[in-house]
Amino acid sequence: MVVSHLIQSLPDATIQSSAQARDTCGDNVKSDVVVVGAGLGGAAAAAVLSRAGCDVVVVDRHATYPADFRAEQLVGSQTDALRRLGLLDGIVGQTTPMPSATAACYGKVIDSTYSLHYGLRYEDMVNTTRSLAGGARFVTGRVAQVVAGSETQKVFLADGTLIEARLVVLATGPNCGDLFPSLGIERTMLSEHHSLTLGFDVQTASRRILVYYGERAGDRMDYLTVFPIGDTMRANLFCYVDPGDPWARSFKLNPKQALLDVMPSLERTIGPFEVVGKVQVRPNSIQRAENVRQQAGVVLIGDAFQSSCPAVGTGIGRILADVEALSRLVPSWLATPGMGADKVERFYTDPAKCQFDVQALRDTHYRRALCTQTSWRWKAYRTQHYYRRRTLGIISRAIRRDMPLLNGAMVGSQHNQKTRKGRLFNSLARSWGAAKRALMAALALLTFG
């Protein structure tokens, strides 16, 4: 059976190279690496490995990735990782970044963070990343079985096509359980119905990015983030509510009122607003794959290995950490014979990857406890955390407001350094700035240390 249904939106050169690589002796395709699943992780892995000179085939059910409610922002360490991988400029394109985000609670501003925020639909991120993997060959189809070995891996598609490669990268997210039994891999449920994410569009006069935290632990709200995607203001609400909870059902019927029920002071920060369009709902469970290190020839990346809670914001970071680990390891693997479990284990013990996985899981359980526990101890901790962070924000804003003026005054007083008054003013200005910076650093240490 001939390999067909190649992604039509890819450049012609990619389609031609796929045809040239087809084994002329039969209906098989051969490559160095087969990536199963072309979401963000699979597409990024294909782009990076193909640029490194690897012969990569990507298999996905969808020729063009469909609309999918997942991550909708790129910020901070995520953009840093994409820049290191050489993918950031291609993904964000002409998207105009927002330079800062404001955090608030109880109707009052807590603090602001200053880093570039990009608002993008997840399907746009994925399809753009796919286009950056021009050296890879894309095949549309469903993988029915993976047969792994210490030398060659065989990937059988549902239409009978066979793809042979030295390495298989499973990037299918948590929905690849049907491939696990033949590989001896098991999936462990760590926290079922761990969290719930709701996405919707809002009409508001404000165009700034807002992160608004839940006001009461009993409501089980983590935070609401409002941000622009093009001309649309988009909102994501992260909470720890079961999908069948009465509040979750009421949100679909009257989202604005349900939101104000749990965040009554929200309009004091965001101003008048309306929820428009359909509310999207995504339940999140935390799972992890077991017995992966002993399996030769196959690595699992992203949610295929360990799923993430979207509220923590580590999902994309973990995916990119896995891709970076692959970029460091796979070229050397392919340069030597075999693809045994010893090579695969090096991926799962990669220090940067391990650190991301462990920290993400720790933060996942911590944030849920922070937002749901109602004991006096957690209440005291939340109150202390709020006032420390708010104080830190006040100091930070004061520094940003005053330091340019003080610096300008110091520059202006340099011509008068020889006078006693000039030297005194210069000394006071420097002391004021140093004291505020020291206090901010001390509060940061107390808050986050």
Image (tube, rainbow, N blue to C red):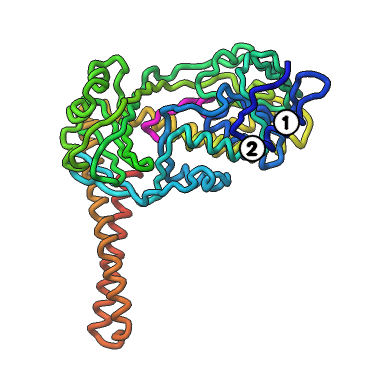
For the view shown, which residue lies furthest in the right direction? 25
Give the magenta range.
Answer: 302-313
At label 2, which amino acid type do we have? Pro
Image quadrant containing the C terminus: top left
Q: Secondary structure at mark 1?
A: strand
Give the percent coordinates (x, y) of residue 269.
Answer: 20, 43
In the rendered image, the vertical position of residue 4 relative to residue 382, given as above or below: above
Q: Which residue is mark 2?
A: 11
Give the percent coordinates (x, y) of residue 320.
Answer: 53, 37
Answer left or right for 224 relative to 124.
Answer: left
Tell me which label, 2 or 1, sits earlier in the chain.
Answer: 2
Q: Secondary structure at mark 2?
A: loop
Answer left or right for 232 relative to 150.
Answer: left
Give the percent coordinates (x, y) of residue 184.
Answer: 62, 14
Q: Residue 159 or 118: which is nearer the viewer?
A: 159
Which residue is rendered at x = 47% and y = 25% of the image?
307
**Residue 303 lies in the magenta-colored region:** yes
For the question of whether residue 353 can be seen, the reply is yes
Which residue is rendered at x = 59% and y = 24% of the image?
60
Q: Which residue is mark 1?
A: 32
